[in-house]
Image (tube, rainbow, N blue to C red):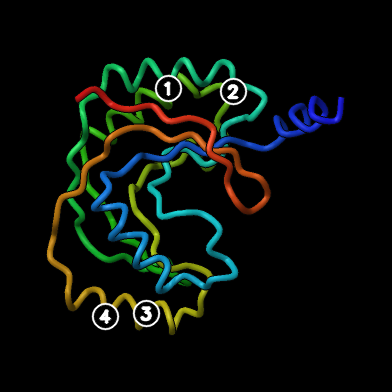
């Protein structure tokens, strides 16, 4: 009974959908995140968020939608276009028409369950620093910008997480077609 209540209580937590990056790109962003994100606030791995808050109680309906979308999707090459200020942090901006098209398709499918943040415009990025002073963030942005050269990363699938009030719990992975 306790385990059942725990599982039932879990459905109250929202779901987060991210893009699975190729291992080399993930390692690059994660190393920067480990180096520059405040350790006490760094509770999740480097990620590119597609949707921030899908309803946890709809997991049984959401999983097959994501599985179907992934089955029909080839891997996505994305251009890392620059280093972006978040005010109190730094991110790498990405450009990928195929990723935007996939997200738009998913948004149409998931629209009845989306909140304002997920209905707003989509600007793909990977955050490597956040929750710091604007001065500290600007110093990192300038440092990373000096070394920056555009490069390509690859999206290989979808990752579904449950937001648990801080850390995320991995729920499912959906690989793209090869």
Mark number for residue 138?
3
Cα distance, mark 3 to mark 1?
37 Å
Give the image quarter of residue 77: top left
Mark number for residue 59?
2
Disc 3 crowd, CA 10 A, few/some/many (<14, 14-19, 20+) = some
Disc 4 crowd, CA 10 A, few/some/many (<14, 14-19, 20+) = few
- Residue 165 in the image: state x and y as whole percent: 68, 50
N-terminal-most mark, 4 or 1: 1
Cα distance, mark 2 to mark 4?
41 Å
Cα distance, mark 4 to mark 1?
38 Å
Q: Nearer the viewer, residue 47 or 173?
A: 173
Label 4 sits on residue: 143
The residue mark sitting in front, 2 or 3, is 2
Please tell me whether mark 1 sits on a helix, a strand or a loop.
Answer: helix
Q: Residue at x 21, y 26 (%)?
A: 74
Label 1 sits on residue: 66
The residue mark sitting in front, 2 or 4, is 2
- When the figure is inspected, residue 76 is found, relative to residue 94, above or below; the finding is above
The residue mark sitting in front, 4 or 3, is 4
């Amino acid at each position: 009974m306790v385990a059942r209540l725990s599982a039932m209580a879990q459905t109250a937590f929202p779901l987060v959908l991210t893009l699975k990056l190729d291992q080399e790109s993930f390692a690059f962003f994660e190393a920067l995140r480990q180096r520059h994100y405040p350790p006490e606030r760094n509770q999740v791995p480097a990620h590119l968020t597609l949707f921030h808050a899908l309803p946890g109680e709809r997991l049984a309906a959401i999983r097959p939608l994501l599985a179907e979308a992934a089955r029909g999707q080839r891997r996505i090459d994305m251009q890392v276009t620059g280093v972006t200020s978040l005010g109190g942090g730094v991110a790498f901006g990405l450009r990928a028409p195929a990723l935007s098209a996939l997200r738009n398709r998913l948004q149409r499918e998931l629209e009845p369950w989306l909140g304002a943040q997920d209905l707003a415009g989509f600007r793909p990025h990977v955050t490597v620093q956040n929750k710091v002073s604007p001065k500290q963030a600007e110093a990192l942005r300038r440092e990373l910008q000096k070394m920056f050269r555009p490069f390509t990363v690859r999206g290989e699938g979808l990752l579904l997480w449950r937001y648990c009030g801080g850390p995320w719990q991995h729920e499912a992975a959906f690989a793209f077609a090869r």
